[in-house]
């Protein structure tokens, strides 16, 4: 395995921070400079910690140049800004019909690709319904499928409330998709280390980033439940091009909100189990 590790010896201050921070002890010093231990290179998970921790930008790995990284900490938002983002994000159930520009969505997804994943596996698939026409087809097929299930009395008792979604739809109310212009579903193959967690973390990061960009979101459990109701008739995941074996989770609707929130809600009581063992 070639890690393409290169050290600019004019920049390297021989601090050994890269050696110490490597989670798999792949790097070691030789004549004061880091090298990759050939017996350990196969453990590399390409986390790039060595590149990130180097104070002088002397280290390049996997063909990645340090000067292309964002400099830290000066580009980080402060605690108050992140607090406002976390406290201020709301579930948006009213959207403008306007699409979020494709370049904006692409940029958001490339930022979210930096979210942590177990063993740095980065196996998430970001399924995006970003065209209005496709979103309309998805909405109509789902609701028509549900209408049929209701009409044929095939709804299970626990999911009987989906009958109300169908009658609301027939009266022009979209309770499931909320007329949102876009849907994101992050799934992951079962073969990677932590598929459920990776997908949810990626969607959470997308959610917060969207909030910072004036884009509203709605986590959505009704869509996957609707898909499960329809599964005897149609595989909606296959319809969206999501591989059969992928671990599925929630949907995230998004778009520009028509509703504006002027203050945060207040639910600060965390249930804390503070451990003292000595
Ligand atoms: C995993 C998950 C699934 C959700 N599914 C739905 C849904 O299907 N429809 C909906 O209107 N809201 C849904 N919500 C939104 C919650 O109702 C909402 O987060 C909660 O009421 C708190 O409101 P807030 O997000 O504005 O703070 C979901 C939230 C989560 C976290």
Image (cartoon, rainbow, N blue to C red):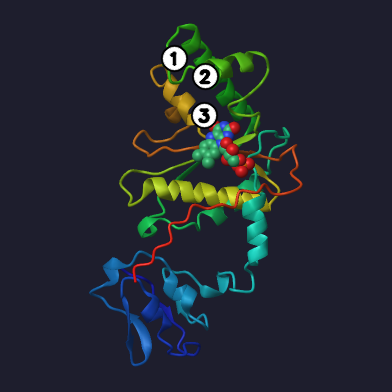
Q: Residue at x 41, y 68 (%)?
A: 62
In this view of the protein, which residue sits in the foreground, 130 or 211? 211
Contact, mark 1 vs mark 2 (Cβ under 8 Å): yes
- Earlier along the polypeptide chain: callout 3 or callout 1? 1
Calculate the distance from the C-alpha at mark 1 to the C-alpha at mark 2. Answer: 8 Å
| Residue with the mark numbered 1 | 155
What residue would you read off at disc 2? 162
Q: CA distance from mark 3 to mark 2?
A: 9 Å
- The answer to whether 148 is drawn above or below residue 60 in the figure is above
State yes or no: Cβ of the residue under disc 3 lies below 8 Å from any atom of ligand 1.
yes
- The part of the image, by quadrant, that contains residue 274 is bottom left
The residue depicted at 42 percent of the width and 75 percent of the height is: 50
Q: Secondary structure at mark 3?
A: helix
Q: Position of residue 54 (x, y in %)?
A: 48, 80
Q: Residue at label 3?
A: 222
Quadrant the C terminus occupies: bottom left
């Amino acid at each position: 395995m070639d890690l393409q590790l290169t050290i600019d010896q004019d920049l390297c201050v021989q601090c050994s921070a890269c050696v110490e921070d490597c989670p798999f002890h792949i790097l070691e010093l030789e004549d004061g400079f880091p090298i990759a231990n050939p017996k350990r290179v196969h453990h590399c998970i390409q986390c790039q910690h060595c590149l990130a921790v180097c104070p002088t930008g002397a280290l390049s790995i996997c063909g990645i140049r340090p000067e292309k990284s964002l400099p830290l900490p000066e580009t980080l938002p402060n605690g108050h800004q992140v607090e406002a983002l976390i406290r201020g994000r709301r579930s948006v159930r009213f959207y403008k019909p306007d699409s979020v520009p494709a370049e904006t969505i692409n940029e958001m997804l490339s930022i979210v690709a930096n979210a942590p994943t177990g063993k740095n596996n980065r196996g998430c698939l970001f399924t995006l319904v970003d065209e209005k026409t496709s979103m309309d087809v998805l909405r109509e097929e789902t609701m028509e499928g549900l209408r049929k299930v209701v009409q044929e009395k095939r709804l299970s008792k626990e999911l009987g409330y989906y009958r109300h979604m169908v009658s609301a739809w027939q009266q022009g109310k979209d309770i499931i998709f909320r007329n949102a212009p876009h849907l994101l579903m992050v799934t992951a193959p079962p073969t990677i280390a932590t598929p459920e967690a990776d997908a949810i973390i990626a969607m959470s990061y997308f959610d917060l980033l969207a909030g910072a960009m004036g884009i509203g979101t709605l986590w959505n459990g009704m869509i996957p439940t609707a898909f499960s109701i329809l599964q005897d008739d149609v595989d909606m995941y296959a319809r969206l091009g999501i591989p059969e074996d992928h671990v599925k989770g929630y949907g995230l609707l998004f778009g520009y909100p028509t509703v504006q929130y002027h203050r945060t809600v207040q639910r600060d009581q965390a249930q804390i189990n503070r451990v003292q063992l000595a």
